[in-house]
């Protein structure tokens, strides 16, 4: 097969073919799936209108490709290994046959509750197998899943439910997180006070905590599942029918419901999973992300399952009961491919090596990283202590919007450079642009990263707001998709992602919009206005620094800080809490009223001497005050 990549020469040849003849290339990849009807046209696109369609005319169901087609040979192979929060509780192994049955039952249960093809279903669940059944169960019947990360607050949940018009929520009574429990059902109840469109809630008993159930609205997952058969016809979906909506933070305004469709997403997540990790039959693969994020969607579920892999789902956290938790699970399940985030690596790096040495990590063959730029130190530590200098590190750069890996090394093929995502995968055509909007060709360049040709898993729109999609991604550099990231291309053509160039900050791998955090802070009755920026943090990558103007300078500053943090936690979720809050009497604004964030960023980074040109400021004196009060 033309697509097999074993050497760098193969990669170059396949890449060239994928660029010169994308239709032939992607048609070749798509051949390998189960189609109810083959596509008519591989790709149709117009980036000036922010449009792309893949495999048009094709009919399929993604769950047939993730489950049914494996049953002939793999019915008894483990599809999912569920590792619980508490290491002494028993892990669960779910075979492809069992996965089939559970997914069919969810499909039938949803139908019994009135869910039809095209309806949106909100899933607010922790990392339990039921979350996987819920997601795939929606796809089985053509319902659109909208998973909301179970760390989000009631307010965030409600906003997402309302924006996507969900009438039903699938949840659990609660979640374990280390030694804590989180009462998810109570959060759902609170959210639904502001989401009157929701008429049904189905609650799985994970904690067995017997939450209050509202008669007529709330149902027991276990009871409902016991009433329905384990056979459910897979709905015939058009290639471009919606598969899911997943929210991501925007640099302004409310979160964006990124829309992903069926065929392109399936083909791409499968291809990139197999290519980047060089997945081989029989390997055990573990991605530590949460199913509430795109990494969980694409690389715990759809990519690995469509490849027939065994995928681990872990409910817990790396630090509990101790810092050996990940390594213990790797030994326990003989994990071959391990995929995690730089923030986890940096926190694990702080713990004594004895937590690693206790466990046998010899099963590991490939390591992965995702979510933010990985610094060289963390890369080297991961390579030496986890990979024992014997596992390639696959630093995958991609986004919720891209659906799958875009720039990434290929395991055992690409010569690695620490902290470089390296080269575009086949089919991906990056272009680095300068601020004047010109493409910087050749090597040794740095600028803004764009993509100039469509790829199958790209988001198709923002749910309900195509204009915003166009404005956000296709207007900065007309005719190109703008990623919001900066990138270098070095003298050998390797890409190194340098980080966001917009008002998104990435805290422990979670994208947060500064505007969203400011809006939450401004809800506090003492606050007039605020400005939020990111600053470098040893473990989290970036942390949140808030400059806050109050009606009067607070007398009990620490008390107010605690209240503001609580406010943000309540409105968005604990992940968005500011790390540092500085009370100021004003913000550095230009005469046109625009906050000069560049200055605030420098202060937050601890730089006070060289703040650049401040002459356009309305009141340059404010900068002195801010510098003097900076929080170290
Ligand atoms: C950042 C997560 C450097 C980047 C899959 C991107 C990375 C944003 C990497 C998307 C990486 C992700 N190296 N930066 N390997 N992976 N990013 O939507 O800024 O949660 O734009 O998707 O994370 O985050 P998202």
Image (cartoon, rainbow, N blue to C red):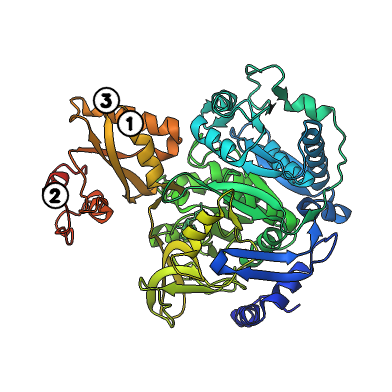
Residue 469 drawn above or below residue 7: above
Q: Position of residue 293 (x, y in %)?
A: 56, 47
Per the image, label 3 sits on a secondary structure element best described as helix
Mark 2 burial class by Cα count in 10 Å: few <14, some 14-19, many 20+: some
**Mark 1 vs mark 2: which is more N-terminal?**
1
Per the image, label 2 sits on a secondary structure element best described as loop
Between 291 and 20, the residue placed more toward the observer is 20
Q: Position of residue 237 (x, y in %)?
A: 78, 53
Residue 334 drawn above or below residue 320: below
From where the camera sits, is residue 359 visible?
A: no
Q: Nearer the viewer, mark 3 or mark 2?
A: 2
Between 258 and 224, the residue placed more toward the observer is 258
From where the camera sits, is residue 15 visible?
A: yes
Q: Which residue is mark 3?
A: 559
Q: Position of residue 336 (x, y in %)?
A: 64, 56
Q: Which residue is mark 1?
A: 564
Residue occupying image coordinates x 33% and y 31% = 564
Q: Nearer the viewer, mark 1 or mark 2?
A: 2
Q: Is residue 363 left or right of residue 64?
A: left
Residue 536 drawn above or below residue 156: below
Residue occupying image coordinates x 76% and y 53% = 62
**Mark 3 vs mark 1: which is more N-terminal?**
3
Per the image, label 1 sits on a secondary structure element best described as helix
Q: Quadrant of the N terminus?
A: bottom right
Q: Which residue is mark 2?
A: 619
Q: Quadrant of the C terminus?
A: top left
Q: Is residue 177 left or right of residue 352?
A: right
Q: Position of residue 188 (x, y in %)?
A: 58, 27
């Amino acid at each position: 097969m033309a697509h097999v990549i074993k050497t760098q020469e193969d990669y170059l040849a396949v890449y060239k073919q994928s660029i010169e003849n994308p239709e032939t290339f992607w048609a070749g990849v798509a051949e390998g799936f189960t189609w109810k009807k083959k596509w008519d046209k591989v790709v149709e696109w117009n980036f000036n209108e922010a449009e792309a369609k893949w495999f048009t005319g094709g009919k399929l169901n993604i769950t047939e490709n993730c489950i049914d087609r494996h049953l002939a040979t793999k019915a008894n192979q483990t599809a999912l290994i569920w590792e619980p929060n508490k290491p002494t509780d028993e892990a669960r192994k779910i075979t492809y046959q069992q996965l089939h049955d559970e997914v069919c039952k969810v499909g039938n249960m949803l139908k019994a509750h009135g869910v039809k093809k095209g309806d949106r279903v909100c899933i607010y669940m922790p990392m339990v197998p039921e979350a996987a059944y819920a997601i795939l169960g929606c796809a089985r019947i053509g319902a659109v899943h909208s998973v909301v990360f179970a760390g989000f607050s009631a307010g965030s949940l409600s906003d997402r439910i309302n924006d996507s018009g969900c009438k039903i929520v699938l949840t659990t009574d609660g979640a374990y997180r280390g030694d804590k429990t989180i009462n998810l059902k109570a959060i759902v109840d609170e959210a639904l006070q502001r989401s009157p469109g929701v008429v049904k809630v189905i609650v799985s008993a994970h904690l067995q905590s017997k939450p209050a159930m509202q008669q007529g609205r709330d149902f027991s997952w276990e009871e409902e599942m016991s009433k329905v058969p384990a056979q459910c016809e897979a709905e015939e979906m058009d290639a471009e029918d919606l598969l899911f909506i997943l929210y991501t933070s925007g640099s302004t305004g409310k979160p964006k419901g990124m829309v992903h469709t069926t065929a392109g997403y399936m083909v791409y997540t499968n291809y990139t999973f197999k290519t980047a990790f060089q997945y081989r039959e029989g390997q055990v693969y573990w991605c530590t992300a949460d199913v509430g994020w795109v990494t969980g969607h694409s690389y715990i579920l759809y990519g690995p399952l469509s490849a027939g892999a065994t995928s681990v789902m872990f409910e817990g956290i790396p630090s509990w009961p101790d810092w050996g938790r990940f390594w213990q699970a790797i030994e326990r399940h003989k994990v071959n491919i391990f995929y995690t985030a730089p923030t986890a690596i940096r926190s694990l790096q702080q713990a004594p090596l004895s937590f690693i040495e206790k466990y046998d990590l010899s099963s590991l063959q490939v390591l992965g990283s995702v979510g933010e730029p990985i610094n060289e130190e963390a890369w080297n530590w991961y390579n030496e202590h986890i990979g024992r200098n014997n596992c390639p590190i696959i630093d995958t750069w991609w986004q919720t919007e891209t659906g799958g890996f875009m720039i990434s090394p290929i395991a055992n093929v690409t010569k690695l450079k620490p902290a470089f995502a390296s080269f575009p995968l086949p089919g991906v055509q990056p272009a680095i642009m300068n601020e004047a909007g010109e493409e910087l060709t050749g090597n040794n360049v740095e600028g803004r990263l764009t993509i100039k040709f469509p790829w199958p898993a790209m988001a198709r729109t923002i749910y309900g707001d195509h204009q915003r999609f166009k404005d956000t991604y296709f207007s900065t550099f007309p005719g190109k998709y703008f990623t919001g990231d900066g990138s270098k291309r070095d003298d050998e053509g390797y890409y190194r992602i340098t980080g966001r160039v917009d008002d998104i900050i990435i805290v422990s791998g979670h994208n947060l919009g500064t505007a969203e955090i400011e809006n939450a802070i401004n809800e506090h009755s003492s606050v007039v206005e605020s400005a939020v920026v990111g600053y470098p943090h040893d473990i989290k990558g970036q942390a949140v620094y808030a400059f806050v103007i109050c009606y009067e300078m607070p007398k009990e500053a620490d008390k107010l800080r605690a209240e503001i943090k609580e406010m943000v936690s309540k409105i968005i979720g604990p992940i968005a809490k500011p790390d540092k809050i500085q009370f100021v009497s004003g913000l550095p604004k230009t005469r046109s009223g625009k906050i000069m964030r560049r200055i605030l960023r420098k202060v937050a980074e601890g730089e006070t001497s060289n703040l650049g040109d401040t002459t356009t400021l309305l009141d340059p004196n404010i900068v002195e005050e801010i510098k003097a009060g900076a929080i170290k």
